[in-house]
Amino acid sequence: MTEPHDNPAKSRFELSEDGQIAFAAYEVEGDTMVFTHTIAPPALEGHGVASRLIGYALGEARERGLKVRPACSFVAAYIERHAEMQDLVG
């Protein structure tokens, strides 16, 4: 099991599992990280990979002092389910 990481050259957080890459694309607009979409290959769906990835990405946004705008429905749903992340929305 690999750890999620930021790939700033592609403006996305990535997590590689079983040779497949799940990612959460973002754009930084001032002091806000806008999550535009999250992709998990079908083979990784239902295994918590995307949730692990988004948890990491939101933690990184917090560490960088950024607010978050969840333009991606998966990120919005994750934040809604995790009260400890709701203060990031700006």
Image (cartoon, helix red, strand yellow):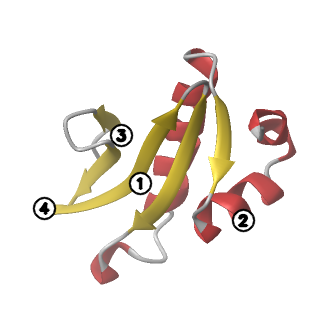
Indicate which disc residue 36 carries.
none
Residue in the image at 34% along x and 56% along y: 23
Callout 4 amino acid:
Gly
Q: Position of residue 52 (x, y in %)?
A: 50, 50
Q: Identify the residue under disc 1.
A: 24
Residue in the image at 61% along x and 24% along y: 31
Q: Earlier in the sequence, mark 3 or mark 2?
A: 3
CB atoms of marks 2 and 1 within 8 Å: no
CB atoms of marks 4 and 3 within 8 Å: no
Q: Is residue 75 above or below residue 33?
A: below
Left or right: where 38 falls relative to 69: left
Q: Earlier in the sequence, mark 3 or mark 1?
A: 3
Q: Earlier in the sequence, mark 2 or mark 1?
A: 1
Q: Residues within 10 Å of mark 2 (few under 14, many from 20)?
A: few
Task: Measure how far apart labels 2 and 1 are at the Cα level.
Answer: 14 Å
Q: Identify the residue under disc 3.
A: 4
Q: Position of residue 14 (x, y in %)?
A: 31, 47
Depth check: give the residue in front, 46 or 83: 83
Indicate which disc residue 19 carries.
4
Task: Measure how far apart labels 3 and 1 are at the Cα level.
Answer: 10 Å
